Amino acid sequence: MLCGLLRADEGSGTCLGHDVITESETIKRQVGYMTQRFSFMRI
């Protein structure tokens, strides 16, 4: 939710000073997301 990938059902929050509900696109441009497990292709 903080990265803007999931929508919050209720409440509020901020990430990097931006509102997670109304400014999710801005947050996505500024935050890098790295999964714990690489699932795109098995090697």
Image (cartoon, rainbow, N blue to C red):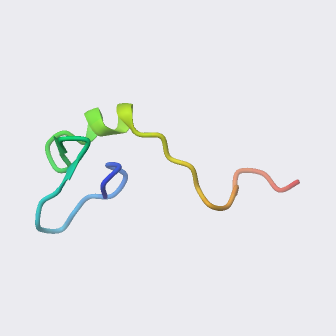
- Pinpoint residue 14: horizontal percent, then vertical percent: 19, 50
Image: 24 above or below 37: above
Quadrant where the N terminus is found in the figure: bottom left
- Pinpoint residue 31: horizontal percent, then vertical percent: 40, 39
| Residue extending farthest front | 16
Quadrant where the C terminus is found in the figure: bottom right
Residue 31 relative to residue 33: left or right:
left
Residue drawn at 62 percent across, 61 percent down: 36
In the rendered picture of this protein, how many numbered marks are placed on residues?
Answer: 0
Residue drawn at 18 percent across, 41 percent down: 17
| Residue extending farthest left | 11
- Pinpoint residue 24: horizontal percent, then vertical percent: 25, 42
Residue drawn at 26 percent across, 58 percent down: 7
- Pinpoint residue 26: horizontal percent, then vertical percent: 27, 33
Image: 11 above or below 38: below
Image: 16 above or below 5: above
Image: 42 above or below 31: below
| Residue extending farthest right | 43
